[in-house]
Amino acid sequence: MIKYALLRIFSCYLTTILARDKEVVAVWLSILQDRCEIYLSKNSDWLDKDNKFIDNITKYLKNISKNAPAKSEDNERNFLVAVTLYCSTKLESRLKKLKDDIEFYGDDEHVKSFKDFFSAKVGDTNNTSTITISGVCKEYYKKIKKAKVESRIPSEFLRHIKKVASYMVSVIGIIKCARNIQYKSLFSNVQVFKGGPVIINNHPIYSWKNIIKRFIDEDKYKCFMDRCSEMPEVMERISKVYTDNATRKQQQLDGDDVKKYICSHAQMNILALIINKGIKSRVFIAVFKRCCYLCKLYTDFARKQGYNIIVFEPQFFTNYAFDWKYMKICSEWQLPHVEDNDFKARSLIYILKNLDQIIEKKLKHYTSSLSANSSDDNIDMYIKKFSNEFEKFEKYTLLP
Ligand SMILES: [Zn+2]
């Protein structure tokens, strides 16, 4: 039990402190007999400052663990400073959202109580360091959780309190784990592995027309495209998907030489590693952001093949639940590179089958509302047909 709790919580802490800005980071922790192995992956390249940061925090983590149970204040302080500097962009953007909430919900009793709590903690509320604010949010969240008033607090405000708090929660959490003598062998010998994304700049793809024509005939395709062209948001999305990454020009929707930038997602890189190693024991993957629909499909497929994978978001360690409301199909997604060709082929069939159903459903929706619309045009017919019903309605004088 301790093992699973540690795996889950520690990977969530790490994911939080490793997301510097907008990138998506995924973390998998593997506990071996005499050490802990940490696998990191993200959806963009690891830069020099990322490597330096990871080397530093690994060093601090090892030192804290080696010195345990004695406290190693220098290492703890260095660790806190490194995290605060590295995460400053993300932390500031979260603080901005919290600030907006405080302004927006200014009259709410809980927001007022937070303001009082904050002033009492920091004294002079001007120029408080970002990590201190994170610490105060952590304390405040503890207080409201204890008082069981979470459900009465504006949800946005509460969410941002938790997000700001997550930095201090993670720093303290990591230090606490490293200081625990029970885990001494794990963290004093910790090994960190970084996996980069697989990026292909000019991957050939089927054209838009090629795909749509598999589902509907030429006549319907024409009507469908007319309909699409009336919707700027749809055309904008089509254009975004088919714009060449290098030339910034939109490629032809019916061309036969369409290319696309594709990139492996952070969660998929780790999953491919687990599949290639054939690890079927329970595995936790912490991902900084909600995964996309294709990552979800691939993970579902892997689960059906016996892989015991649990995906977590580090938002205060709430269990990851897929929500259709947030379903996002990413056009830059790439099939993970697994060595087992049979697995690869079957996973592709599984994903395409699900995608086909979605395309079919969407096309049905758009092409059927087409015919409904054209009959709507004849208002006279409509009025004649339902004139008896109209007698029952209240009358209104529109024109003077
Ligand atoms: Zn994804």
Image: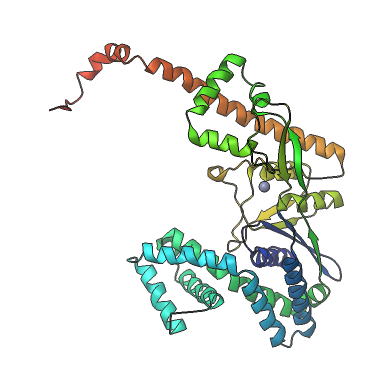
Give the quadrant of residue 124: bottom left
Of 197 and 202, the residue lying toward us: 202
Labels in figure, total? 0
Of 81 and 26, the residue lying toward us: 81
The location of residue 6, given as percent across then percent down, is 71, 67
Of 148 and 302, the residue lying toward us: 302
Residue 244 in view: yes
Residue at (75% x, 56% y) in the render:
283
The location of residue 31, given as percent across then percent down, is 80, 65
Left or right placement of residue 299 versus residue 227 in this view:
right
Give the quadrant of residue 281: bottom right
Of 367 and 242, the residue lying toward us: 242
The location of residue 375, given as percent across then percent down, is 40, 15
Residue 149 in view: no
Residue at (49% x, 34% y) in the render:
232
Residue at (86% x, 52% y) in the render:
277
Q: Quadrant of the C terminus?
A: top left
Vertical placement of residue 386 versus 243, above or below: above
Give the quadrant of residue 247: top right
The location of residue 354, given as percent across then percent down, is 67, 33
Vertical placement of residue 30 versus 129, above or below: above
Left or right placement of residue 162 versus residue 151 in this view:
right
Q: Quadrant of the N terminus?
A: bottom right
Colour treatment of the image: rainbow
